[in-house]
Image (cartoon, grey):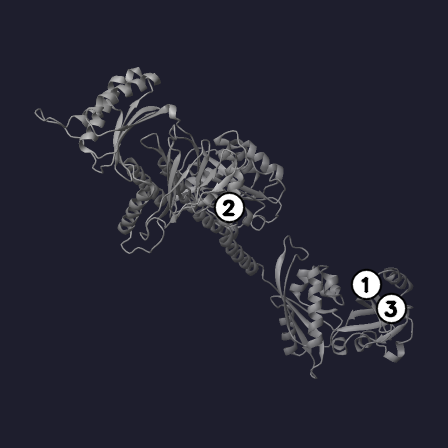
Amino acid sequence: MSSVVNEPLDMVYLATATMDSHGVVTGWSEGAQRLLGYLPEEIVGRAVTELWAGGTAVEAVGRCLAGRSGWSGRVGLCHRDGHRVEAEALAHRVVADGGATGWLLVSAVAREPCPPEADAAVGAFTQAPCVLAVFDTDLRLVRANADMEAAAALTEDRMRGMRLVELLPHPESEKTEEGMRRVLENGERQVLEAYLRVPGESREHAWTISLAPLKDRTGSVYGVCFAAYDTTRRHQAQERLLLLNEAGKRIGSTLDLAHVAHELADVAVPRVADFVGVDLLTFLDQGEEPPSGPLSGPITMRRAAHRSVLPGTPEAVVDVGELDTHPESSPSAECLAEGRAILYQVTDELMVRWNALDPVRAARIREYGIHSELVVPMRTRGVTLGVVFFARHRTPVPFDEDDLLLAEEITARTAVCVDNARRYQRERMTARALQRHLLPRRLPDLAAMEVTSRYVPSETWAGVGGDWFDVIPLSGARAAVVVGDTAGRGVEASAAVGRLRSAIRTLADIDLPPGELLTHLDDLVTRLAAEDDPEPSGATGATCLYAVYDPVSRHCTLASAGHPPPVVVTPAGSADILDVSNGPPLGLGTLPFEAVETELSEGSVLALYTDGLVESFYRAIDEGLEALCEALAQPAPSLDALGDTVLHTLLPDRPEDDAALLLARARALGPDRVATWEIPPEPAVVSRIRREVTARLMDWGLEKLVLTTELVVSELVTNAIRYGRPPIRLRLIRDRALICEVSDFSSTAPHLRRARALDEGGRGLFLVAQLAQRWGTRLEVQGKTIWAEQDLSED
């Protein structure tokens, strides 16, 4: 077996020899000749045991080599001239090119004195301020400096001849040896990064490893220079920057307080701490203003989030969502009172103090071995929001000042997100409260229809939208139902809802037909938009659907301003989309609004809704309309149950948009509750009409209203004969009130005025206003109708 050690390194550093598996010397270097005096031809082929000084040494070495791949120790050797040589030796099992196994024997060589410049080079090597070593072409260590000895916890003599994977058994060592092989193959330098714990250290360190080829005067590579620099602090700084960058990306992805708190805990565990708890002050629960002045005394907070490296977070004293009161002298109370972060190393003295303040928390600290803790106040924009706890119990290294700065920075970034969520929550709650006050708190009880409604606000960060609905009683036992959707979200959208709802109620009070009402509403929206923005952008102001139902004729008149069409559910259970002429949205002022009229069977359900019910990011409006029709066609024991079915079928748990639903079941007033007279334009007919009206009231059992009704009928019919145009018609409707209507073809509306003492007229309408609970005038397509109502609640 030939020598496997490169000659230049042998000559300078080592005495090496090789032997086969039978103990016969097969190779002898110049360093071995210098050490023991034998020439190669004198020793090659002889048994290596002839070199040991004494049989005992031979037996000891034989036992050490048996069944092992390497050995190191001090041996006694025989010099050629017969004297004994003591040397530190290493033995490594090697494999020759032919596959035969043998041993490589290595020992140091006493060198000749070096010139001064050589001493300087040796001193620079041994005292270099980094881990420095030289490996031969077999990746065996040849030289090592003091830092290398300290890192490996071995002397240079003990390490000589060993590979890096033998010195430091670790996957990083295997990667480093791969880099060494590349250096030997291509002669180019390699720079590697490693992260491992060396012997004698309690924690892992980051290392930057530089590998460079060593070349002789001919340019041949005879070894590898290994230099390692401890870059732990730089690595930690980079890790902190990466963590802060990740925190900036992950924390604040939503405007939900609890979610933001969970994001902080997810980022910090386990890279900063083994346990993190986030407690927020209770004023955040209801979106209230923060408390004024410094916080003092026992402080109650709600656990918003926590996380641990242990499953189930057993270190936590309270569960997420629960309240926890912190004593006045507790770390959290001190932290909030002083407004600064506090770093604690848990000591026996502190445990005695904490055990007196909070025995439950102290017990958890002892149980899970918490040895280091950070308490950081969450403050931003002058507002204190809560506190964050960082604790270590599985990580052996305690927190230091760098960890404190990192925890403060993460908490500060989270505080901005929490405050944004607080402000959003406050605005959202304000908008919701305003929306609740603007929507009908209680739907009226109508003879014309049974109504029920549903309103579901959006659960996304975009906030409350401008969806709304209303039910308006009209004259003649009729009722109007309306649903709409304004542009925008938040308080501005709610304010727009208030404007539109007030305007529609005003226009409905003068009994404008649906198409005409939307035209006036469109003008109003256009004017308001011009006031708010002198340079309008052309954005849609609102959509609206307005319908009027008459229970006497069972006719329903509808007009739409860019709103989704209504659905009619027949008494048989089929649901169909009603074909309504869809005009432009309100605020564009382009085209008139055309009304359509349809007849509703008694018991039919008219469904009005906003687009949030049928349209979403994941569903087109056509699919939503189909799903709505299927849901409305499902049998339901009541109108309320039908509304619940629709919401359960169409809406997710967290709707992306507001959704409003208004269901109206049509009722009918039969001939037994309506009386109609065609009146000739002759004053003499008034007395006959009074008698017939009295007879009808007697039939209905309304004897108490005979006198007042005769007076109302006499005045209204007389005025119609005197000032109106035929044909003239009188109609009595028995609803929740007794309604008296007189219609004629004149479009001139009467005016209530106070008659003077000598005036012959002017007292009729004044008398009607005094006798009736309500009265008014509505314009028809041809002519007008004057109506008056008397309350029947006491009858």
Q: Element type at marker 1?
A: strand
Q: Is residue 61 above or below residue 224?
A: above
In the rendered view of the protein, which quadrant contains the C terminus? top left
Q: How many neighbours does mark 2 have within 10 angstroms: few (below 14), some (14-19), or many (20 or more)?
A: some
Q: Amino acid at mark 3?
A: Thr
Closer to the chain start, of discs 3 and 2, is 3
* Residue at 62% in and 71% down: 124
Question: CA–CA distance between discs 2 and 1?
Answer: 77 Å
Q: x, y percentage for residue 187?
A: 68, 77
Q: Is residue 330 above or below residue 766?
A: below
Kindly state the secondary structure of the residue where label 2 is placed: helix
> Which class describes the residues within 10 Å of circle 3: few (<14), some (14-19), or many (20+)?
some
Residue 422 can be seen, yes or no: yes
Helix, strand or loop for disc 3: strand
Amino acid type at circle 2 is Gly
Label annotation for residue 109: none
Q: Which residue is mark 3?
A: 101
Q: Which residue, given by chain and number where applicable, does mark 2 sit on?
A: 624
User: Where residue 700 sits: x, y (%)?
Assistant: 35, 18
Tell me if mark 1 has few (under 14), some (14-19) or many (20+) residues whose alpha carbon lies within 10 angstroms of its own.
some
